[in-house]
Amino acid sequence: MKKIVSILLSVVLSAAMSLSAADREHTLKVYNWADYIDEDLISEFEKWYEEQTGEKVTIVYQLFDINEVMLSKIEKGHEDYDVVCPSDYIIERMLREDLLLPIGRDFGKAPDYLGNVAPFIMKMLGLVDAGGKDATEYAVPYMWGTTGILYNPKFVTADEVKTWEVLRNPKYAGKIYVKDAFRDVYTSLLVYLKKDEIDAGKVTLDEVARDASDESIALVENWLNSMKEGVQGWEADFGKELMTKEKGWLNLSWSGDAQWAMDEAEKVGVKLDYAVPQEGSNIWFDAWVIPKYARNVKAARYFIDFMCKPENAIRNMDVIGYVSAVGGPEILEAQMDPDKYEPLDASYFFGPEATAVPLSYVLYPDKSVIERCTMMHDSGDRTEALLAMWSRVKGDNASALTYVIIALTLLAIILAMIFSRRKKSRRRKSSRRRRR
């Protein structure tokens, strides 16, 4: 009987695996950041794909929150995701490790929307250290932004946030939050600390962004150590919410998070603002790629192309608050608001006709800001040294207020335990009395 059951189970499993394999031909596995797409576009793509190809496809949409987790699944687990959205430095690593397939532009009779990506962002993609490959053939930029300072103008002036030095101002101690993103922080601060060398022409912005020498790591570490006593928290996502509640006054943040916080704060009568310090910072971008182990490359290419349609780029921006890498007149028209914004120079992104257009300075910084920013890179075998530095800085970060909070928390736990034991003891005594 057990043998019959075993045989039947084997047949069922084999059939299920065959069915799964057949379904996989009409399944598109997308691996993306959380809250990073207008989810209505998922079902709309399925319909659009069938219209374009005559074939059905179903999207399996999964989320990740750390680049390295995503990379590990593909690198070590050989996961068969068809479309993934890694950040710039991870794209460098994936290309060097031969983990990506070319995007290609063969869409049959369907339109080709990949060319809608702004030349400025494609230029940034061209700076990717791809191990001899042309990164523009393997990735299509999706969203981009800057790293800067989100601040509360009720407590911090616009002049103060023109420099990264504001983060070391003792009068803001306990009101500062810093992104727990060592690459963004390191690159931005190294640009600041090497400003004189950059201005003197001794080193370029891109060379600084690639510098992970012991000397430069020590330079940034010393600066971070000199300001960390004032840092209330190193955060991945909660800083922007604390800013809207005025529990934080300064937040080293990404532009997309800053815009979200500014919009949310306005709803509750709180004013926030954002600035990229004059010394410079970094530009980042995320891009769609097709991993080496993808099993539906055709649908993956169509999906990436679909996301480059101007109307879809606008919808994604409206939902998630970040800036699409797609440019062009449709995007410019949708983003301009003369009643809300002062004119700025966005010609680097939209072309010469956009030298004075009313756009959000958070989402589309003025050309003068962009010119002092650079793209961060993967640090290769120097990553461990950077991580060790970051760990030392955060590990030692325990200001007096932090120690007080920890002590009070531990005291509360101890008192709760004592109270709980006494209560149980009283209950046991009461129970014995009742039994007697």
Image (cartoon, grey):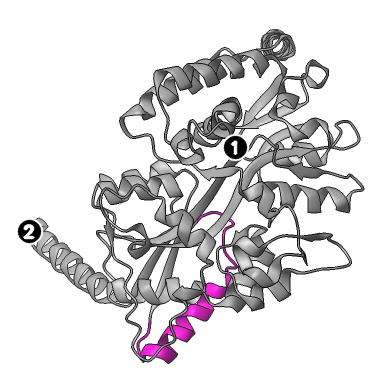
Q: Quadrant of residue 144?
A: bottom right
The residue that label 1 is drawn on is: 236
The residue that label 2 is drawn on is: 3
Front residue of 138 and 322: 138
Per the rendered image, the range of residues in magenta is 33-56
Name the residue: 69% across, 56% down. Answer: 363
Q: Quadrant of the N terminus?
A: bottom left
Q: Could you tell whether 315 is left or right of 1 in the image?
A: right
Q: How busy is the neighbourhood of tag 2: few (under 14 within 10 Å), some, or many (20 plus)?
A: few
Name the residue: 26% across, 70% down. Answer: 20
At which x and y percent is residue 145? 60, 51
Give the structural element (helix, strand or loop) at label 2: helix
Q: Could you tell whether 33 is left or right of 70 in the image?
A: right
Name the residue: 52% across, 18% down. Answer: 219
Regarding residue 180, the answer to whether it shows in the image is: no
Amino acid type for the residue under numbered disc 2 = Lys
Q: Quadrant of residue 190?
A: top right
Task: Give the label on residue 154, or none.
Answer: none
Distance from disc 2 to disc 1, alpha carbons, whole Å, reads 54 Å
Whether residue 345 appears in magenta in the rendering, the answer is no
Q: In the image as oriented, which residue stretches furthest toward the front? A: 200
Amino acid type for the residue under numbered disc 1 = Ala
Q: Quadrant of residue 346?
A: bottom right
Q: Is residue 207 above or below residue 264?
A: above
Query: Which numbered disc, 2 or 1, marks the residue closer to the eye?
Result: 1
